[in-house]
Amino acid sequence: MKIKLLIAAATLGLALSAAAATDSNLGVRAYEVNLSDFRMARDENGTVGFKECDKCEFITKRVSPSTNYMLDGRSVSPEKFRKALHKVTDREREVLTILHHLQADKVIEISVYFVRTGS
């Protein structure tokens, strides 16, 4: 009985690692960009613009109502996200992560963790 349980556990482990390998190839590309090189969409069906590097051209990617906006690890509305970005004074210091789903050709998440300075 223990042999069958061990074989079942090993098979399940192999299946889970195969599923994880499949999930990692879902076709999502992550961009890390400085806030100074980012332009927020005007509405929930618009486009965001950003540069991958200082010498790169601006590229645009479509957002949708299902795009998730993360602010310091919490999901917020696009309006709250926009207001928080607008308050940043040192835009070179802050970095956004943009997750672009390649097959759907839409941004699925934009996140930022603000750099905190000590007093």
Image (cartoon, rainbow, N blue to C red):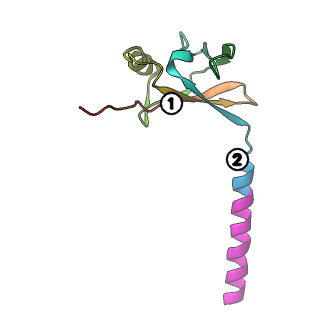
Name the residue: 67% across, 24% down: 106
> As displayed, is residue 17 above or below residue 85?
below
In this rendered view, identify the residue nearer to me: 118 or 10. Answer: 118
Q: Residue furthest top?
A: 42
Q: Verify whether residue 17 appears in magenta.
A: yes
> As displayed, is residue 26 above or below residue 15?
above
Q: Residue furthest left?
A: 119
Q: Amino acid at mark 1?
A: Ser
Q: Which residue is mark 1?
A: 111
* Magenta stretch secondary structure, dominant: helix
Q: Which residues are magenta?
A: 1-18
- x%, y% of residue 66? 57, 27
- Residues packed near mark 1 inside 10 Å, few (<14), some (14 to 19) or many (20 plus): many
Q: Residue furthest front?
A: 55
The local secondary structure at tag 1 comes to strand
- Residues packed near mark 2 inside 10 Å, few (<14), some (14 to 19) or many (20 plus): few
**Quarter in which the N terminus is drawn:** bottom right
Name the residue: 55% across, 13% down: 41
Q: Which residue is mark 2?
A: 24
The image quadrant that residue 2 belongs to is bottom right
Do the residues bearing badges 1 and 2 touch, measured as CB atoms within 8 Å? no
Q: CA distance from mark 1 to mark 2?
A: 19 Å
**Nearer-N-terminus badge (1/2):** 2
- x%, y% of residue 48? 60, 16
- x%, y% of residue 65? 56, 22
Q: Amino acid at mark 2?
A: Ser
The local secondary structure at tag 2 comes to loop
Name the residue: 73% across, 53% down: 21
**Residue 10 shown left or right of residue 50 in the figure:** right
